[in-house]
């Protein structure tokens, strides 16, 4: 269950029969006292304490069933990027409707030594092959035209960010291979992938290496924990700046997918450095160049 918000403590305080527990719940709910905000953070947010655990500790709280749905928040839907191309787009007669998802199983230990599992990822990992799911398709940022798929590409996707990029690569193969017997070349496509360990975390690694070997796709990886000094995907971008710049000169599109934390900013800074160095311009002008690519639809980002 979710980590409770301060409003949750304010609501359940009404149903606490013990005066001390009621007072403590009200303290957690106060938004304007810095000391009490720290108490709330240490109790709920930092240890990722769940709603169920709060109710188990505040035993005098008895919520009437009529109020449960209004107090306990519903589970939010989870969104996952599709990691495969739509075959029916280029062959309307195709009956194959297979969707590939790349899902990281969430599991960690909190500071109070309790194991936490991701609600949705664990549920999906335990599904049997015959079970059915209710799903909804939502349009994302990676809506590419055939012109986009024919153009050179710089694909940047650490971790599960490689999922939508795999869809892009398969889309390029479908468009470029239409009506041909030969396997389409990908020598104008550069995939940058990063994660912790090559042995355990190189998602779709075998097929990406095969594309590198047989179709000429450029591939650069950054596995941060496989050597003493950590290497990240932005380091690989700077290392391969010359090739990136050559692809950009040919009209390449840049697609960035993955975590919405510090990674996108670090990648953008690396791209600005590459443009500034290879084009021999100032950083300010490189920033303007990248912003121009965003406006022109040549730099797209799907992060979560």
Image (spheres, grey):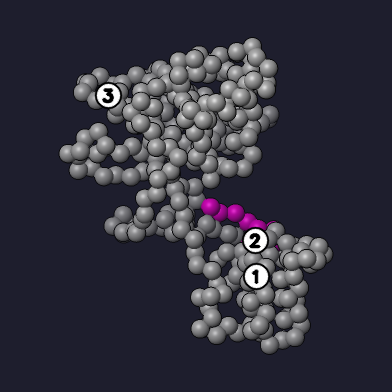
Q: Are marks 1 and 3 in contact (CB under 8 Å)?
A: no
The residue sitting at 38% across, 30% down in the picture is 169
**For residue 50, which quarter of the picture?**
bottom right
Counting from the top left corner in percent of width and height, residue 158 is at 53, 35
Question: Would you say residue 210 sits in the magenta stretch?
Answer: no
As measured in the structure, the alpha-carbon distance from the residue carrying label 3 to the one carrying label 2 is: 49 Å
The residue sitting at 64% across, 78% down in the picture is 12
**Circle 2 is placed at which residue position?**
48
The 10 Å Cα crowd at callout 2, few under 14, some 14 to 19, many 20 or more, is many
Q: Which residues are magenta?
A: 106-114
Counting from the top left corner in percent of width and height, residue 163 is at 44, 39
Question: Would you say residue 108 sits in the magenta stretch?
Answer: yes
Counting from the top left corner in percent of width and height, residue 201 is at 51, 38
Tag shown at residue 102: none
Tag shown at residue 177: 3
Q: Is residue 227 visible?
A: no
Q: Is residue 143 visible?
A: yes
Looking at the image, how many numbered discs can be counted on the residues? 3
Magenta span: predominant SS is loop
- Residue pushed farthest right? 35
The 10 Å Cα crowd at callout 3, few under 14, some 14 to 19, many 20 or more, is some
In the image: residue 130, left or right of residue 93: right
Circle 1 or circle 3, nearest the eye:
1
**Label 1 vs 2, first from the N-terminus:** 1
The vertical placement of 21 against 262, above or below, is below
As measured in the structure, the alpha-carbon distance from the residue carrying label 1 to the one carrying label 2 is: 16 Å
The residue nearer to you, when weighing 117 against 228, is: 117
The residue sitting at 36% across, 50% down in the picture is 137
**Label 3 vs 2, first from the N-terminus:** 2
Tag shown at residue 7: 1
């Amino acid at each position: 269950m979710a980590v409770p918000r301060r409003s949750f403590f304010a609501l359940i305080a009404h149903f606490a029969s013990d005066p001390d527990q009621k007072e403590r719940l009200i303290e957690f709910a106060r938004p304007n006292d810095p000391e009490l905000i720290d108490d709330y953070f240490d109790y709920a947010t930092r240890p990722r304490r769940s709603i169920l655990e709060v109710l188990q500790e505040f035993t005098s709280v008895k919520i009437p069933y009529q109020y449960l749905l209004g107090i306990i928040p519903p589970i939010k839907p989870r969104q996952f990027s599709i990691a495969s191309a739509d075959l029916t787009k280029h062959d309307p007669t195709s009956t194959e409707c297979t969707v590939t998802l790349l899902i990281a199983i969430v599991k960690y230990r909190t500071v109070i030594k309790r194991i936490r599992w991701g609600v949705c990822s664990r549920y999906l990992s335990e599904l049997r092959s015959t079970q059915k799911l209710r799903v909804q398709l939502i349009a994302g940022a990676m809506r590419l035209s055939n012109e986009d798929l024919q153009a050179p590409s710089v694909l940047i996707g650490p971790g599960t960010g490689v999922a939508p990029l795999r869809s892009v690569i398969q889309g390029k193969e479908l468009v470029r291979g239409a009506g041909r017997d030969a396997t389409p070349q990908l020598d104008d496509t550069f995939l940058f992938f990063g994660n912790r360990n090559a042995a355990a975390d190189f998602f779709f690694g075998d097929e990406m290496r095969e594309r590198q070997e047989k179709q000429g796709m450029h591939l650069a990886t950054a596995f941060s924990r496989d050597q003493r000094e950590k290497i990240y995907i932005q380091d690989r971008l700077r290392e391969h700046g010359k090739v990136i710049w050559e692809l950009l000169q040919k009209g390449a599109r840049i697609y960035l997918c993955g975590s919405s934390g510090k990674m996108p900013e670090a990648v953008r800074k690396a791209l600005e450095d590459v443009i500034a160095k290879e084009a021999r311009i100032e950083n300010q002008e490189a920033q303007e160049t990248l912003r121009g690519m965003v406006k022109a639809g040549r730099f797209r980002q799907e992060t979560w």
